Amino acid sequence: MSGGLAALLDDIATLAKAASASIDDVGTVAARTSIKAAAVVVDDTAVTPRYLQGFSPSRELPVVAKIARGSLLNKAIIIVAAMMLSQWAPWLLTPLLMCGGFYLAFEGAEKVLDWLGQSTRKESVQPTQDENQVVSSAVRTDFILSAEIMVISLKEVTTETFWMRLAVLVVVAVAITFLVYGVVGIIVKLDDMGLALAKRKLTFVRLVGRALVRSMPIILKALTIIGTLAMLWVGGHILISGMGEVGWSLPAHALHHLTANLGDVLAWLVDTGISTAVGMGVGVTVIGVLEIIKKLGGRTDTEKKPTK
């Protein structure tokens, strides 16, 4: 009896070690895939605070919580679709990822052109007190960004088992959602924290509070710039790598040969700079094509109008 019990305990210990190793593996792979999706995460963090303009301070965090719940639901739907895709049509992952690369390049280029005063896109987010409308709009934007995060993450674990892929996507989805909306919650409350500190008696505390209030526009602007550049970089890199996988390997080979004999830091800088330039070029091209299509569509509608 004692021998059987000892054997059972030994089996349990072995299973526990295996489970622990699996958890470590999931955490490691999830961390690696999250880094690949960093550009979209930064942009998501930079975009969301815009939706909270016009709300009273008491409603800001509840609205953030509603958007976060919608984001988790988005990711749950996307994970189901992504797992089905990886199981039965994995060959679609690269084309879908490249579509995401075009989207990132387009969004990044739009923002750069907007800074230069050349954007043709009208701002769609307006200050409003209608929580349902704001949450709905933010969740729709989040769906696009979440889809890109999940596809990037899935592409990194295509060689893993079904359950490992599922576990990694779930961990990435939950971790990134809490990270993004946790940071957003802190950002939208920084000015309130600053105002509260500015009313304290201690001079140093008051100075810190005033500095927080004054730094808010700078923080939001910095997030927007970093997010935009990251979108262009990752979008360009996805497109360069994707073209190599679908049959046109010249751009990827050229970039590899260009950085092969450079040091790690310089190679990364060159790779990042070229990828960002490619993202910007592709984004501007997409914008130009869409503008031509829009003008042709408008001209066709004008031609169809009956003359009086």
Image: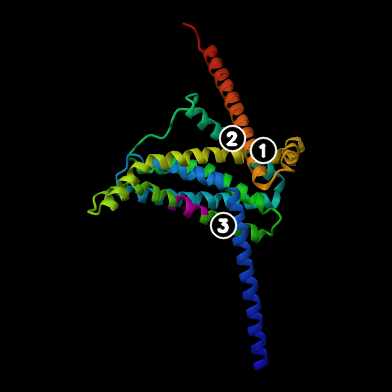
SS assignment at label 1: helix
Asked if the residue under mark 2 is in contact with the one under mark 1, i.e. CB atoms within 8 Å, the reply is yes
Residue 246 is situated, as x and y percent measured from the top left of the image, at: 74, 39
Mark 1: amino acid: Leu
Name the mark on residue 82. Answer: none
- The answer to whether any part of residue 118 appears in the image is yes
Position of 3 relative to 282 (above/below): below
Residue under the point 30% across and 48% down: 207
Position of 140 relative to 114 (above/below): below
Q: Which residue lies furthest to the top in this view?
A: 308
Name the mark on residue 239. Answer: 1
Alpha-carbon distance for marks 2 and 3? Answer: 27 Å
Where, quadrant-wise, is the N terminus in this rendering? bottom right
Please report whichever mark, 1 or 3, sits nearer to the chain's N-terminal start: 3
Alpha-carbon distance for marks 1 and 3? Answer: 26 Å
Q: Please tell me which residue lies in front, 290 or 284.
A: 284
Asked if the residue under mark 3 is in contact with the one under mark 2, i.e. CB atoms within 8 Å, the reply is no
Q: Is the magenta stretch mostly helix, strand or loop?
A: helix
Q: Residue furthest left?
A: 201
| Drawn side of residue 281 relative to residue 252, left or right | left
Let me know if residue 201 is in the magenta part: no
SS assignment at label 3: helix
Mark 3: amino acid: Val
Q: Give the range drawn in magenta.
A: 176-182
- The answer to whether any part of residue 98 appears in the image is no
Q: Mark 2 points at which residue?
A: 105
Name the mark on residue 170. Answer: 3
How busy is the neighbourhood of tag 3: few (under 14 within 10 Å), some, or many (20 plus)?
some
How busy is the neighbourhood of tag 2: few (under 14 within 10 Å), some, or many (20 plus)?
many
How busy is the neighbourhood of tag 1: few (under 14 within 10 Å), some, or many (20 plus)?
many
